Amino acid sequence: MNKGALVIVPVIIVVLVAFGGMFTVDETEQVVVTQFGKVVGEPRTAPGLYFKIPFIQNASYFPKNLLEWDGDPGQIPTLDKTFIWVDTFARWKVVDPLKFFQTVNNVTGAQGRLDDIIDPAVRNMITSYALIESVRRTNRELDTFESGVDQEETRDKRQLGTVTIGREKITKGIMEQAQPKLAKFGIELVDVKIKRINYVEQVQKSVFGRMIAERQQIAEKFRSEGKGEARKIEGETEREMKRITSEAYRTAEELKGKADATATKTYADAYGLDPDFYSFVKTLEIYRETMDKESSLVLSTDAEFFKYLKGYMGN
């Protein structure tokens, strides 16, 4: 049994030494081998199986693919003295693992270097140009409009200035300033973009206040135009009602006049045919309209008004 143990122990040691002396590199990695802190040989950048002296040499891995840098938003004044918050991000990669290891040692250290180099480059470019340069790319006319607002007036308000550089060239300038400083760390800056630009709080309040005032002015204009239109419609309606009423009154009077004329003619014709009968009928109408069962009359016997009653009573 002791002999078996004596055989197994060396085998285990050999296996551990063998595994400790091998390392692999995949497609997304690159390795620098060091011995007591000093670099040994060339960096291993091709994928495959490699060997090193176990327990003496150490393999330091670094990513080969693109890495992200996200800057802290900062307050920056533009050339036209407008304070804005600028938030940027970048993509970078390790192109020289030997320089990278000897200068920044790891990704965390590289992030600190990126902060120290990209942030000042962003500040330098933003402060060198007016706000419009960081916001827009070209001088293309804005195609937005406000309903009910004169388009010429809106176009004048939208003229913030003329773009001579543009946002893309500003980000390109940031890269041109930062890349030479990062090259000595074995870093290649692949891309830099401005994620967001916003006014600082004080300027935001001023801008929002101006926007509110403009909207209130537009709303007041709409209300004024609406009231004017309402008064116009009410006036036209009243005028139309008076016209209709006048025409209806005229038509009614014409009909009444024609009816009165027809009635008068009818009465006249009837009176001409039998005057006594006409007088009798009209007198009966007067009796009906002026007297009822509660009426009392005091008349002389020779009164004209009483002649038909007298004749009736006499019969």
Image: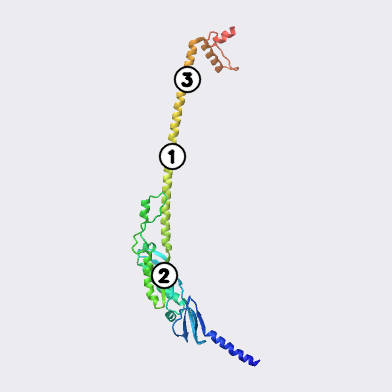
Secondary element under disc 1, as helix, strand or loop, is helix
> N-terminal of the two: label 2 or label 1?
2
Front disc: 2 or 1? 2
Quadrant showing the C terminus? top right
- Name of the residue lying farthest toward the right: 1
Q: What's the mark number on residue 63?
A: none
Question: Which of these two is toward me, 60 or 136?
Answer: 60
Give the residue at mark 1.
Answer: 233
Number of numbered tags placed on the structure image: 3
Disc 2/disc 3 C-alpha distance (Å) = 101 Å
Q: Residue furthest top?
A: 315
Above or below residue 199? Residue 53 is below
The label shown at residue 260 is 3
Where disc 2 sits, the SS reads strand
Q: Amino acid at mark 1?
A: Ile
The residue identified by callout 2 is 191
Front one among 42 and 132 = 42
Residue 83 relative to residue 296: left or right: left
Residue 65 in the image: state x and y as whole percent: 46, 73
